[in-house]
Image (cartoon, coloured by chain):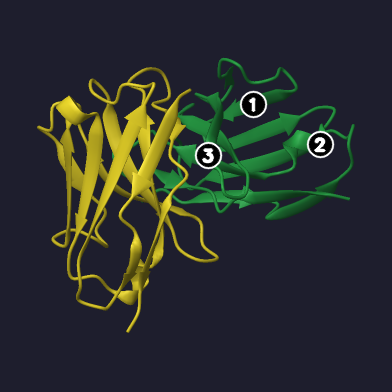
Amino acid sequence: DIQMTQSPSSLSASVGDRVTITCRASQSIGDYLNWYQQKVGQAPKLLIYAASHLQRGVPSRFSGSGSGTDFTLTITSLQPEDFATYFCQQSHYPPRYTFGQGTNLQIK
Amino acid sequence: EVQVVESGGGLVKPGGSLRLSCTASGLTLSGYTMIWVRQAPGKGLEWVSLISSDSTKMNYADSVQGRFTISRDNSKNSLYLQMDSLRAEDTAVYYCARELSGYGRPCDYWGQGTRVTVSS
C-alpha cells in the first residue's frame, strides 16, 4: 500500500497566520490527493480534491498544490474556526485508499 | 439539513459481533460508492471496506478480510458493516463516507463516527 507521510503532526499558529501542511506519498499518485478538516466530535469535511480543487463552499483562504509525491495544503490568514485536525488521503489506487496521520493545528 | 449518521457501535468481547449502520437524510447514498474508514485510538485513518453503488463490487482491507461484510440497502438509503470475530485491534471509531466518482475520487460526506470497543 502507498504510505502517506504528513507533516508536521502538530502545529501552533495565531489568527491571521499563514500555515502550510505537507503530505508525501511513497510513490507517485498523480494528483489523486484530497484534504480534509476534522473538528473534535464532528464529521470530516472535504476541503480540497484532486490536489488543488477547492470544494464548493470552502473559503478561498484554503488552497492545495502539488502532484506526483509531494503535496501541500496552505491556509492563508487563519481564522478561529480553522483550528482543527487536517489529513490527506490518496485515492490513486482504489479501493486501497490511505491517509496521512493528521496535523493538529492549535492556537498559539 | 444534510446528515450522515452511523450507529451500532458499542462494547463487545473478543470474538463477538456487531453490525454498524450508516443512514443519510437530506442526501442520497444510492448511486454512489460508499466506504467505511476507521480510526483507532491515537492512530491515523484506515480504509476498511468499499461497496459499489449497485453492490456488485465489495473490497476489504487485509486486516478485516473474511471477518467483516459490507452491504447496503439503497431503498433505505443505508449502508451496513457486519463485523464478526472481533479483535482488540478492531477497537476504533468507524466512519462511513460517500465517494464521488469524479476527479480525485474524494469523499464529500462523512458521518461523525460510531465507537467500537473490543475488550473482555
Q: Which residue is mark 1?
A: A64
Q: Amino acid at mark 3?
A: Pro
Please identify which colour was used for chain B in the image. Answer: yellow
Q: Which residue is mark 3?
A: A44
Q: Are marks 2 and 1 on the same chain?
A: yes
Residue B89 position (above or below residue B103)? below
Image position, residue A37 (x, y; %) = 60, 38
Of circles 2 and 1, the one toward us is 2
Report the chain shown in green. A
Q: Residue furthest left?
A: B56
Q: Chain of mark 1?
A: A
Residue B30 position (above or below residue A93)? above
Image position, residue A95 (x, y; %) = 28, 40
Q: In the image shown, does B47 or A15 lie closer to the viewer?
A: A15
Q: Residue at x 28, y 74 (%)?
A: B87
3 or 1: tag closer to the N-terminus = 3
Q: Which residue is mark 2?
A: A80
Q: CA distance from mark 3 to mark 2?
A: 18 Å
Q: Residue at x 49, y 26 (%)?
A: A31
Q: Residue at x 63, y 44 (%)?
A: A39
Q: Secondary structure at mark 2?
A: helix
